[in-house]
Amino acid sequence: MAVGVLALQGSFNEHMAALRRLGVTGVEVRKPSQLEAIEALIIPGGESTTMAKLAHYHNLFPALRDFVSLGKPVWGTCAGLIFLANKATGQKLGGQELIGGLDCTVHRNFFGSQIQSFETELVVPKLAEQEGGSDRCRGVFIRAPAIIKAGPDVEVLADYTVPLDKLRSVASDAEAEEAITDSQGKVIVAVRQGNILGTAFHPELTSDIRWQMRKASDETSLECLDLSNQNSYYPLGRRPFDLPIFE
């Protein structure tokens, strides 16, 4: 199965490297016609406004929306999550075009500027419940968004409690403040709805290769790979030399 990575801007190289580590064929997608040759799509993190302008320039939005509506697996990380949301707040003046499909409101740059980027441990019960192994994963948040509202058909996979010392740096508009108050300081950072998976963080920047989408029968589900022996996934028990990752 060929997996496409939208390669307009952002961390598409890191996603391609993660696919290579899994032994999956990755295709860099820059034209609408390239979507016809893939079975799943990853929309990477990056600068969402720039990505939207480039997608508009290459007339990708109609084809991307068709791809999502066909029910093929789609995963958006960080800026990709913003792209897939039905609504985004905290945008730059003039806003940006979205693909949609995910019944969520995502706040762009919720956690602040680049210097407020951080790493933390997240609890994701579905990882252990569906496939076994640990329910913990490392979350790398880089000028990250957060989901401040999720519709009834959206499954919440992970949330994050904003520490008191970070409250000053997170988004301060009315919708964001209301979301933090109503949820007692928690915001949603990973969701799934049908064929769409969305994460506010960057699994591709870690050695944890469990976050991916797979098609099983008529359902699209989160796949968890057992990482108890990570070397078993690499020839001769050694990782290939590739882009650097965080352990």
Image (tube, rainbow, N blue to C red):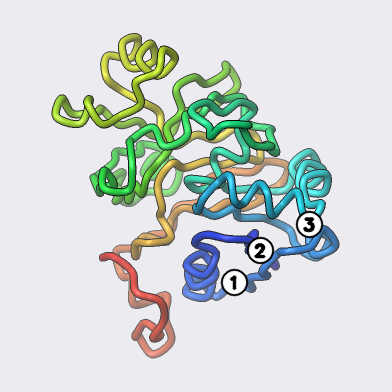
| Precedes in sequence: disc 1 or disc 2 | 2
Residue drawn at 15 percent across, 25 percent down? 164
The quadrant of the rendering that contains the N terminus is bottom right
In the picture, residue 58 is in which quadrant?
A: bottom right
Residue contact at pointers 1 and 3, CB within 8 angstroms? no
Give the alpha-carbon distance from disc 3 to disc 2, as whole Å.
Answer: 20 Å
Q: Amino acid at mark 2?
A: Val
The kind of secondary structure element at disc 1 is: loop
The kind of secondary structure element at disc 2 is: strand
Label 1: few (<14), some (14–19) or many (≥20) C-alpha neighbours in 10 Å: some
Of circles 3 and 2, the one toward us is 3
Q: Which residue is mark 3?
A: 58
| Precedes in sequence: disc 1 or disc 3 | 1
| Vertical side of 37 occupied by 189: above or below | above
Residue drawn at 28 percent across, 65 percent down? 246
State left or right for residue 96 relative to residue 245.
Answer: right
In the picture, the disc for residue 3 is: 2
| Vertical side of 124 occupied by 29: above or below | below
Residue 73's x, y, as percent? 66, 48
The kind of secondary structure element at disc 3 is: loop
Front position in the image: 129 or 230:
230
Residue drawn at 51 percent across, 64 percent down? 15
| Precedes in sequence: disc 3 or disc 2 | 2
Front position in the image: 147 or 48:
48
Residue 238's x, y, as percent? 34, 85
In the picture, the disc for residue 24 is: 1
Give the alpha-carbon distance from disc 1 to disc 2, as whole Å.
Answer: 7 Å
Of circles 1 and 3, the one toward us is 3
